[in-house]
Image (spheres, coloured by chain):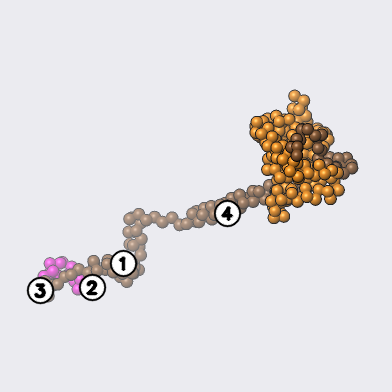
Chain colours: A orange, B brown
Amino acid sequence: MEEQVFIAQLLNPATQNTAFQKLISDYQRPLYHHIRNIVLDHDDADDVLQNTFIKVFRHLHNFKGESKLFSWMYRIATNEAITFINQKAKRRGISTDDLQNSYTAQLKADTHFDGDEAQIKLHKAIALLPQKQQLVFKMKYFEEIKYEDMSEILDTSVGALKASYHHAVKKIENYFTEN
Amino acid sequence: MKPFKLDEIEKIETGFKVPEGYFDDFSLRVQQKIQETKPERKRYLITRYRKLISIAAILIVALGIAFVQYTKAPVYDTSDESVENYLASNHCISNDDWAMMLDEKDLQKMEANMNLNNQEIEEILASEENFENYIID
């Protein structure tokens, strides 16, 4: 009910600006980390985050309330981030996998990265996973999103998500054992 | 070597840093960008429907030309009576004109094959009351 009232405020021109500022304030941090985990680079994450909120603002009138506002926004952010890295790879004439591998290879040089060897190793291991497994692993392991919410965001069954996460963990563990 | 187990070690964080003060003015930047990109939407809509508008315009012009041609075209009354009246009122149609309108086949059909000798011609003319007209023509 509270969410419906908030959505009504977002759609009402008289209260829209204040409500939208609150929406940004509540979601900017979790959405930033969600996007950053996908695109990896801070400047890219900044672009995608801005575009995500602009898209949310423009399409608020299309939000039917069939899913939670949280899930709807995460879905937009996920699509924007994946589209962004796919387009970036295409512009460079390389695959998305190669783009991510090249980024993780020079992670140490990134001024907006403050990780140790284990963290770099984990990013390298994740970059070797299929795109869907990467997404599920990052959302579960780093962001600690519940499977039920993830199911709404990614439009995938909870069972399939658990299987994806399980396979991802096994592959990462093997990578750590072998390297 | 002991197999590595992710849940047996302390959680590994991403290591990603956010520049200091990044979120302070983020809301403002988004609001500004929304204002800046407003005209883009109108242009996008026009671009999106440009093909449809072009097709509609071509159709309207084509239908307009067809309509004007149709309404300007003279209406011909081609009934038998009209044709007869026309022919009766146009005495200037010569034999040559008629011949122009007929093709070779029509002309051949019209050539009667009459092998008449003088005696027969005289008999035919004698039986006609106004035979003088034939002789004049």
The dot on residue B93 is none
A130 in relation to B74, above or below? above
Of marks 2 and 4, the one in the foreground = 4
Q: Position of residue A53 (x, y in %)?
A: 77, 40
State which tag comes first along the sequence, 2 or 1.
1
What residue would you read off at disc 4?
B58
Disc 1 target residue: B102
Question: Based on the displayed image, in which of its 4 quarters is residue B11 positioned?
Answer: top right
Q: Which mark is residue B137?
A: 2
First along the sequence among labels 2 and 4: 4
| Kind of residue sitting beneath label 4 | Ile
Q: Secondary structure at mark 4?
A: helix
Q: Are marks 1 and 3 in contact (CB under 8 Å)?
A: no
Residue range of the region highlighted in magenta in the rendering: B123-136
Count residues near mark 3 (Cα–Cα under 10 Å), then give few for <14, some for 14-19, many for 20+.
few
The subunit carrying tag 2 is B
Distance between mark 2 and mark 3 Cα atoms: 20 Å
- Tag count: 4
Q: Chain of mark 4?
A: B
The residue to which callout 3 is attached is B119
Q: Residue at x 27, y 66 (%)?
A: B106
**CA gap, disc 4 and disc 1:** 44 Å
